[in-house]
Amino acid sequence: MSLQRRRKLIPWMFALPGLLWLLLFFAIPLINQAQVSLMSGDPEAGYTLTWAFDTYTNAISDYHEQFLRSFLYAGIATVVDLIIAFPLAYFMAYKAGRWRNLMLLLVVLPFFMSYVLRTVAWQLILADHGWVVERLRDVGLVSADGRVLATGTAVVAGISYNFLPFMVLPLYVALERIDRRFVEAATDLYASRATAFRKVTLPLAIPGIFAGSLLVFIPATGDYINAALLGTSKQYMIGNVVQSKFLTVLDYPTAAALSFILMTVILVGIAIYSRLLGTRTLTEAAV
Amino acid sequence: MSARDRTRNWLLGIWSAAALLYLFIPVFLIVLFSFNDNKGRFNFTWQGFTLDHWAHPFRDPDLAKALVTSLEIAALTTLGAVALGTFLALALTRYRFRGRGPANFAVFLPMATPEVVLGASLLAMFLVVGIDTGFWTIVIAHIMFTVSYVVVTVRARLEGMDPFIEEAAQDLGAGVWTTFFKVTFPMIAPGVVAAAVLAAAISIDDYVVTSFNAGQTQTFPLFIFGATRQGVPAEVNVLGTMLLLGVLVLMGLNLLVQKALNRRDRGIAAEPPSGTPTQAELEPAAA
């Protein structure tokens, strides 16, 4: 084999094992899942492929409520995280000085405490006779016999909390990369601080806002730990349904159809969102 | 600096401090309640200080076994994902080859897919093929969804590195493997270590994908989730805190080793800032 030919093979030699793994355990399962979603039968007799498209229509009519709730909770959590994270990221990028690295470490650190355990800690924080709920009662935000735990608020609070670092980090990176001379130029040209922020800093931070929102929204829509631990069946999200269909009811076609719909909606959503924000390609934005 | 600017900076600082505090309250509570002298099964109210749980963290044999299983899975996952992901990252940054675009997309897609879809589709395939789920299917699943994070982390390091050093080695007659082990690997080592810490942390902490592919195998997060109904024992808080401290120690060591190496190699290669997980976490989100 000529040297030229060999050189061409090198990247493949490096990439192939990893790509094969993704093909075998990511791509093929997804294709297989599409097939499973079109099967019919029951857990005892087994399932056969019958091209049963009505599984999809049934899944949507039976579970549109959980779907909508997933997108609603995830959407609120994304906005809440953006509001909390933007000033923090801004501070870290421009004002923190020598505290910057310490602050970055502090943002990542909670990640390394068990996710399930952190969510259990929220049960404690939002407990009916806990300090937080008592104070909320004092100021009248919660009625005397009202509770926070086992409500949508608790689930959204848990989701916002758990995914907050995913919003802070990309925002920080985007802000930190902005050449401050652009802002100086704007103020030199008599733009007010607010205008300079709105016309210069904010547009340049859009890739960070885009990446952060996706990194929060995507895992949040599929999440079911927060709904399971902080809510009741009335707060169940689509992840809870998929999980119980798959592992408890053993209704594989419905579970497969539901997760397929979820994935499709998310991918279409990313495409529209990236158009709206003018980010050029998906991979570029998220990687 | 005008008084208005100073007020603005103060507000930003207070907001940031509050946001960090918010991130830390659950972590702080988990650590605090690992010292709680709780009577009965529930660990929700403070009943006095004890070191008892720290003295006997492995009292519950099921818990001890679950933790050991999680550590074993994390070790195997880290090995697999780092091996596959490092070479994949190398192929994607250092070579232009046909199929590079789709390969990039294949790396991006698992990160854009909700975990519940990843877990469910993989289980569906194991069911169809007739593979019993358990320890090894968890390892397979974990490698599948951590590879992308390794690629992104290592790629961030590679992009900050001068490719001409590798070309120089090859011009001087070093083969592909010699170049990799003598030149590339030593330079990207901090990035690889950061990727390894990240992969291990994601693996140890994963609940969703694991719950689908675990069969009868019990991991640390599965144990905690299962225990939420009867009350999570305080030993779980102890072990969670230990894991957090373990990660901190690893990150610190990585930093120290890097600093020592930088001191030794000063002048050979211009080093980008350290590749701790902090840095690693930032890069995937960067546009």
Image: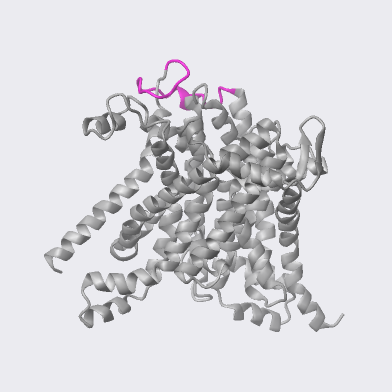
Choose top left, top right, bottom left or bottom right for residue A54.
top right
Type of secondary structure dominating the magenta stretch? loop
In the image, is residue A9 above or below residue B118? below
Where residue A166 appears, x then y in whole percent?
46, 54
Q: Residue furthest top?
A: B40
**Quadrant the C terminus of chain A occupies:** bottom right
Residue A10 in sight from this viewpoint: yes
Classify residue B99 as left or right of residue B18: right
Choose between B269 and B128: the one closer to the eye.
B128
**Quadrant the N terminus of chain A occupies:** bottom right
Classify residue B198 as left or right of residue A146: right
Write the residue at 73% across / 41% down.
B136
Residue A116 in sight from this viewpoint: no
Choose between A267 and B232: the one closer to the eye.
A267
In the image, is residue B160 above or below residue B24? below
Choose between A96 and B58: the one closer to the eye.
A96
Where residue A157 appears, x then y in whole percent?
40, 41
The residue segment tinted magenta is B39-60
Write the residue at 80% across / 40% down.
B131
Where residue A171 appears, x then y in whole percent?
41, 62
